[in-house]
Image (cartoon, grey):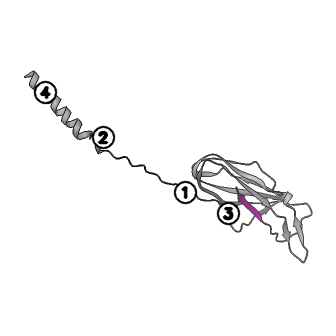
Amino acid sequence: MRKSLFATVAAAGALAAAVISPGVSNAADTVVTFSVAGGALTLTAPLNQVLTVTGNQATGGITPVVVSDLRRGINGWVASAISSAFLKPAPDPASIPATAVAYQGTAATVTGVAVVTPAVGPVLDTIKPVQTATVVVGSNTATWTGNVTITLPTNVVAGNYTGTITHSVA
């Protein structure tokens, strides 16, 4: 009985192996390929922002500033900003220079994989980094508020001033 049980188990095992593992002569390999396309690196910010004047400063937040990195790569990015002078029109024109404009980005809310770090209070008289993304893997977005402080000169003239803060990303 032991021999017949052993023979039955051995035969069942051989049959299962034949059914589960077909012979190499019945195999066909297919090489499968595909391409993952990368997208764009973009930045958006609101078109208008009103600042509040308290004492000798005009302050407010430009929000939301959003970088969308759909390149699907591992390269980081740097968001920068620059300010124009702030001008008051006639009849008594005046200006506040860009050297009076400071910018502090908040900690960014990030989706995807990226470490985004704000710069510490750059003056926007020339183009300056305001947020830097490192340790990037794949697509990511970062959203923050750019807090703007304009220090008013002691000889500031009353009126409405207009200037432009331009964000960019590369």
**Circle number at residue 37:** 1
Q: Is residue 60 above or below residue 117?
A: below
Give the main secondary structure of the magenta stretch. strand
Residue 119 relative to residue 40: left or right: right
State the CA–CA distance, disc 4 to disc 2.
26 Å
> Could you tell me the amino acid type at mark 3?
Ala
Residue 51, image x, y percentages: 75, 64
Q: Which residue has dot 2 on it?
A: 24
> Could you tell me the amino acid type at mark 4?
Ala
Q: Quadrant of residue 46?
A: bottom right
State the CA–CA distance, disc 2 to disc 3.
61 Å
**Label pair 1/3, CB-CB below 8 angstroms:** no
Q: Earlier in the sequence, mark 4 or mark 2?
A: 4
Local packing at callout 1 (Cα closer than 10 Å; few below 14, some 14-19, many 20+) is few
The secondary element bearing badge 4 is classed as helix
- The quadrant of the rendering that contains the N terminus is top left
State the CA–CA distance, disc 4 to disc 3.
78 Å
Magenta-drawn segment:
163-169
**Residue, far front:** 25
